[in-house]
Amino acid sequence: MIFQRTIPPSYLLDSSTAPGPDSLACKVLRQQKALVGVCRTWHTIASPFLYDDIYIRRAGQLPALLRALEGGQTNFGDHVQNLTIYCLVPQQYSNQFHQDMSRVFHLCPRLTSFAYTSPCRLPTLNLPPLKPSLTHLKLSDAIQHDALTDALMDVCSELVSLSFQVPATAGVMDPRLRFPRLEYLYCGITAVTRTYLAVVEQWFMPKLERLTFKLNGNPVSWSGDLIATCLVSFCRAHGKGLTFLHIHPEYWWSMAKFTIAVQPLLDHCPALEHIVLHPRTAPPLTHPKIKWIDIWEPHVREVCVEEWTTVRLGLTQQAFPSLRGVRTLGAAMAALTDLPIKIPPNLVLDFADTFECKFLDLLVRHDPGSLRCIEPEWPEDASDSEEDADFVYCSEDDLVHMDGTVSDDSSLTWLESGSEADSDTYIERHWDAGIET
């Protein structure tokens, strides 16, 4: 429990920032490695925290991870539950990448969550065969066409949660896919791919309870009627059992150019209890069953603020007879797509329940009716020249980042980087060499 309090929960880490040399995810990794390196006792206790959620941010880290999993007396693969790939896979490494991924899947029997969130497409366009036992799958829009269908067919029978981007070509998507256990679906759509949501609409999803639509791309390409047409049809087909609905925004300067008619969606979701509203929702709204309402904060443009205020003031007990609370979500946290589910609005009902999650420069505060990220204060006396003089682009420690694992009884490995970092080599550091016995 003590170690759990030393690092933030994984859902507060945005995987898209992981490659950054000083990202929060990298700072978390350094903290995890520091815990493992204290002594033998801490090594044993802290190892599950290091291996539980793994990010691969450079292709060379995958074979290094394999060396850690295959070497030594301790089976660290038993600790791995979540694996995220966020890197460019070079053409020359394509075949080996598929082999290494298959071996990692084999060595991690408790792996239940896999994510390929890299914006870079694979050289072969296909993912390696996925573990049939995966229950959570997240794919970026780099996984398209046949690769998407093949990946879904590998795991559709066991999936509980699926996050993906609707591809721009519908012909290669199979409308007959069956997801008998799927409870949560996250669909990213653009003004172009919205029409192909009709294929997803035909999937068999009898247990679907939570649904998120992510509106991607410049809103100049959108219009309210286009949004309503594709989303209403989907809710008509699958809205009967939904208890959670989220219209997730992508913030653009042009967001003020459209509004979303959410009421037609609510009309097809009679069992809704929790809704998360886009900041450009068109009023008025009403629903007899909704208990909790989250609403994303508006765009900085003044016109957005005025119209957002109108929507916010309309979220009353009169319009929602079962309403128990309304909460605003800070726009700075919009990249954390699962935030409204991971931190439900019923956690803080009065000021006595207020809490914070603080780690280095991350500070998330939950007050009654508000969940937001508190920005760190900048030094008042620091001049530009002083800042530039102290700035280090990438330290040796930064190069380690998402690489640190513990290979056997003995080593903090997968990619201990230094002068050889560019070649993605790794240096074994035997545990016994660093501990006095």
Image (cartoon, grey):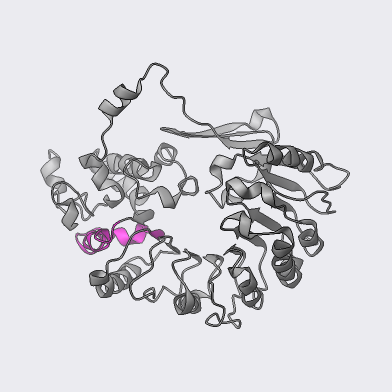
Instruction: Check the image and report above or below for 221 versus 21.
Output: below
Residue that appears at 70% across and 31% down = 350
Q: Residue at x 27, y 52 (%)?
A: 405
- At which x and y percent is residue 153? 50, 79
Percent position of residue 284, x then y? 83, 49
Q: Residue 99: x and y, percent?
A: 28, 74
**Residue at 21% from the left image edge and 59% from the top image edge:** 73
Q: Which residues are magenta?
A: 58-85
Q: Nearer the viewer, residue 191 or 11?
A: 191
**Observer-nearest residue: 242 or 392?**
392
Residue 107 magenta: no
Can I make out residue 287 in this image? yes
The quadrant where residue 379 appears: top left
On the picture, is 273 further left or further right than 84? right
Q: Is residue 211 above or below residue 341?
A: below
Q: Which residue is most to the top?
A: 381
Residue 348 shows up from this direction = no
